[in-house]
């Protein structure tokens, strides 16, 4: 077991453990390292079935079910040990492993094979709520109403909370903000040759497949006005239809819009083509807020507020509209929106219907640009950007809704 490692996930349900476990397995495999996931839940569902969906199954005072859960864990650990004994590299134990006593059991069972405990935290209330709500669609809640499933799952979490202890006592551990690919604290397992690769995977941004679309033409675009909440023109609606037709065969799991009408109207034909897709409107993707200049024409601003035009001409990235935003400020909230969108999509394909300034910023979160160039990036309404970022695939391309793919620049 000299060249093997047990990675044991730690965290309450809906904290992103399984997504990180999957990334670790894929990322390590891409490095030529043998890695496999051992999931307690898979055994539980196969062996116990419906009874284990009931919240009481997780009551730590219920000695009968506690014994069943311990047995499942021991069985899973045995599988992992056997696999490591046959030349496996990194065994990833995917379970809550919420209590110290459970973690002690894992430590005893793995003995001379080092164990790294990775605790996943999700302290973003918006994301936590969305993740918990998604659980109601799990196959194990078939036959439950959404409300019943939600109540049951929340009660399950409450039982786990009664015995949950953060990592810290174990010899090697890492505490991760799973929503931001960030290591919050760690006691590194430096003796393991796999540790640097694991660290790298934890802090990397993964994008299964992301399409960045700009809304179609609006009445304000035609009039040279900014901001506001205008509807699409006839041409804008046609662009939205063309986009939907182009995306017809594309696998999509999530569509994010801003809270603006033009973003919703652009997404509408696409959503009609993909009825099962998850949809979420996020104010983080609303267009740059022009404050006192909202709804004005560029020509009007030049005439009535020449200091605004001059300020933007001098430093368009840093200039803040009176009572409004700058690109620099916009970047912060768009980055927050992207982080949330990527966490929710969990490596599945997503699409964002954004705006001119929003998409400029989104693009540069993947493709490094000088700050002063960001506000001048061309964001057409008849093309979109497609981005994939994983150890296996790195793609950054701009695609016309009707024409073949046009490669742009490789990702950094
Ligand atoms: O003109 C459309 C628009 O989305 C406006 O709502 C927004 O203020 C503007 O683009 C952002 O682009 P710029 O920073 O070049 O004015």
Image: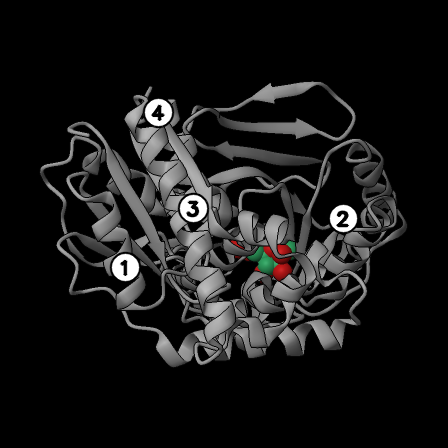
Alpha-carbon neighbours of circle 4 within 10 Å: few (<14), some, or many (≥20)?
Answer: some
| Residue 101: image location, x then y, percent | 27, 66
| Cβ atoms under marks 4 and 1 closer than 8 Å | no
Left or right placement of residue 144 versus residue 193 in this view: right
Q: Residue at point 19% right, 30% down?
A: 1
**Pointer 3: what residue?**
75
Which residue matches tag 1? 103
Q: Is residue 64 left or right of residue 85?
A: right
User: Splitting the image into 4 quarters, where does residue 386 fall?
Assistant: top right
Q: Is residue 322 visible?
A: no
Q: How far apart are labels 1 and 2 at the CA level?
A: 53 Å
Label 3 and label 4: CA atoms lie apart by 21 Å
Q: Which residue is mark 2?
A: 216
Q: Secondary structure at mark 3?
A: helix
Where does the image place residue 46, in percent across and percent down from the top left?
A: 62, 48
> In terms of secondary structure, where does tag 1 sit?
helix
Label 2 SS? loop
Q: Is 161 above or below relative to 97?
A: below
Compared to residue 22, the image places residue 181 above or below, namely below
Dot 4 or dot 1: first in sequence order is 4
Ligand 1 within 8 Å of the CB at mark 3:
no
- Residue 323 image offset from top left, x and y in percent: 47, 79
Q: Earlier in the sequence, mark 3 or mark 4?
A: 4
């Amino acid at each position: 077991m000299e060249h093997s490692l047990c990675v044991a996930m730690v965290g309450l349900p809906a904290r992103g453990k399984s997504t990180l476990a999957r990334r670790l397995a894929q990322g390590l495999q891409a490095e030529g390292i043998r890695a496999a996931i051992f999931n307690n839940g898979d055994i539980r569902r196969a062996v116990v079935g419906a009874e284990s969906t009931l919240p009481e199954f997780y009551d730590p005072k219920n000695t009968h079910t506690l014994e069943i859960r311990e047995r499942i864990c021991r069985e899973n650990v045995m599988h992992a040990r056997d696999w490591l004994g046959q030349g496996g590299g990194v065994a990833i134990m995917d379970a809550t492993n919420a209590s110290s006593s459970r973690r002690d059991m894992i430590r005893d069972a793995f003995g001379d094979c080092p164990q790294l405990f990775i605790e996943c935290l999700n302290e973003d209330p918006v994301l936590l709520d969305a993740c918990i709500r998604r659980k109601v669609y799990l196959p194990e809640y078939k036959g439950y109403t959404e409300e019943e499933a939600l109540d049951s799952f929340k009660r399950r979490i409450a039982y786990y909370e009664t015995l949950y202890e953060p990592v810290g006592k174990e010899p090697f551990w890492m505490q991760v903000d799973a929503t931001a690919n960030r290591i919050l604290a760690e006691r590194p397992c430096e003796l393991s040759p796999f540790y640097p690769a694991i660290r790298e995977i934890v802090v990397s941004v993964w994008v299964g497949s992301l399409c960045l679309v700009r809304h179609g033409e609006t009445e304000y675009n035609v009039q040279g006005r900014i901001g506001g909440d205008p509807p699409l023109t006839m041409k804008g609606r046609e662009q939205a239809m063309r986009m939907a037709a182009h995306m017809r065969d594309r696998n999509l799991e999530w569509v994010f819009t801003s809270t603006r009408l033009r973003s919703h109207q652009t997404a509408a034909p696409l959503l009609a083509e993909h009825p099962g897709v998850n949809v979420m409107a996020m104010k983080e993707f609303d267009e740059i807020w022009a404050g006192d200049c909202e709804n004005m024409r560029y020509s009007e601003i030049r005439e009535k507020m020449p200091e605004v035009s001059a300020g933007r001409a001098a430093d368009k990235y840093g200039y803040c509209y009176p009572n409004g935003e700058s690109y620099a400020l916009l970047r912060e909230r768009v980055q927050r929106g992207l982080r949330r969108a990527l966490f929710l999509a969990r490596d599945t394909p997503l699409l964002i219907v954004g705006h001119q300034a929003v998409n400029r910023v989104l693009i540069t979160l993947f493709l490094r640009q000088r700050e002063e160039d960001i506000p001048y990036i061309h964001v057409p309404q008849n093309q979109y950007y497609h981005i994939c970022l994983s150890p296996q695939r790195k793609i950054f391309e701009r695609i016309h809704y009707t024409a073949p793919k046009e490669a742009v620049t490789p990702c950094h």
